[in-house]
Image: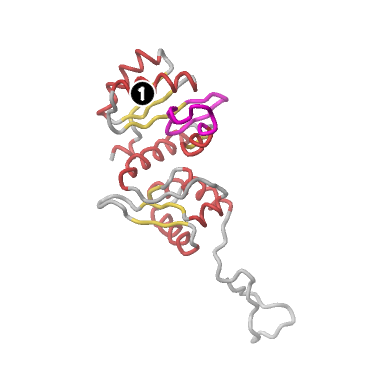
């Protein structure tokens, strides 16, 4: 960026001094916060980025372009008819101060990734005092424990009023035995679990929540953004 001011005592026609960081894109603290969330969630859609910014889709497209010019992120429509996804580059990871493995676009993961981010935004919108621990961080924490490979990590963990609630996002129906195993494990580890489920798995989850959860498991509909 070139300064537009004229230094005192300098002739008005003299060349203006160039900033030492001319041509570079500077990052605000708010940008860093947004980049961290993108990295934590693997990737976010442009509509989700707009919600995170509290701005229009036009503003989100502008920010994505700015990040791409700076080399911090990439954005692309990975599925026909679906929104553009934005994810961090290695440089973006370093800038945001996160050291998770670099995410590579994976079409098979996109629906679940987007649904988990919708749930994160939905929960934190309704509980401003809560915090969210992402699945990538939980994976790191569990990886340091004995027998970690056999343990299931939830899609997120909400910490609210000092209480931990495991969050699971279910778009498809798993085998009943697998659901039972996961539900019992998460209740034992965290004390309570909230499922956000599509219609197909919801009935089975509600039945098992009654049998296994004993008041410590609730099953909710997916946020309206995911149901579109």
Q: Residue at x 57, y 49 (%)?
A: 97
Measured as percent of width and height from the top left, residue 109 is found at 34, 43
Left or right side of 171 for 154: right
Residue for badge 1: 219
Residue 154 among magenta residues: yes
**Looking at this view, is 97 or 86 the one in front?**
97
Instruction: Specify whether 191 is left or right of 196.
Output: right
Local crowd size for mark 1, using a 10 Å CA cut-off: few (<14), some (14–19), many (≥20):
some
Q: Where does the image place residue 156, in percent across and percent down from the top left?
A: 45, 33
Q: Compared with residue 157, is residue 107 higher up or lower down, i.e. above or below?
A: below
Q: Residue 222, position in %: x, y?
A: 34, 32
Question: To which quarter of the image does residue 42 belong?
Answer: top left
- What residue is drawn where x is 39% and y is 37%? 116
The residue shown at (25%, 28%) is: 200
Q: How many marks?
A: 1
Image quadrant assignment for residue 187: top left
Tell which of 82 and 6 is nearer to you.
82
- Image quadrant occupied by the N terminus: bottom right
Q: Which residues are magenta?
A: 142-165
Query: Foreground: 154 or 52?
Result: 154
Residue pictured at 43% horizontal, 52% vertical: 87
Picture layout, residue 11 above or below residue 139: below
Residue 34 lies in the magenta stretch: no
Q: Residue 227, image x and y in percent? A: 29, 37
Dividing the picture into quarters, in which one does residue 182 lie? top left
Which corner quadrant holds the C terminus? top left
Q: Nearer the viewer, residue 170 or 174?
A: 174
Per the image, label 1 sits on a secondary structure element best described as: strand
In the displayed structure image, the side of residue 193 where residue 160 appears, left or right: right
């Amino acid at each position: 960026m070139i300064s537009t001011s004229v230094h005192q005592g300098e002739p008005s026609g003299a060349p203006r001094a160039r900033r030492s960081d001319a041509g570079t894109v500077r990052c605000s603290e708010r940008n860093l916060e947004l980049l961290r969330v993108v990295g934590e969630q693997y990737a976010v859609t442009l509509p989700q980025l707009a919600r995170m910014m509290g701005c229009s889709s036009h503003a989100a497209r502008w920010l994505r372009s700015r990040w791409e010019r700076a080399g911090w992120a990439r954005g692309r429509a990975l599925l026909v008819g679906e929104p553009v996804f934005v994810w961090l580059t290695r440089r973006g990871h370093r800038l945001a101060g996160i050291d998770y493995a670099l995410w590579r676009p994976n079409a098979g993961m996109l629906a679940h990734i987007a649904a988990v981010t919708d749930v994160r935004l939905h929960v934190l919108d309704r509980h401003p005092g809560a915090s969210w621990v992402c699945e990538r961080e939980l994976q790191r924490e569990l990886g340091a424990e004995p027998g970690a490979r056999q343990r299931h990590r939830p899609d997120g963990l909400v910490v609210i009023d000092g209480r931990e609630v495991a969050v699971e996002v279910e778009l498809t129906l798993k085998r009943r035995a697998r659901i039972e195993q996961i539900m019992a494990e998460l209740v034992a580890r965290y004390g309570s679990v909230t499922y956000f489920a599509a219609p197909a798995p919801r009935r089975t989850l509600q039945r098992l929540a009654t049998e296994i959860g004993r008041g410590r498991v609730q099953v909710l509909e997916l946020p309206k953004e995911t149901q579109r």
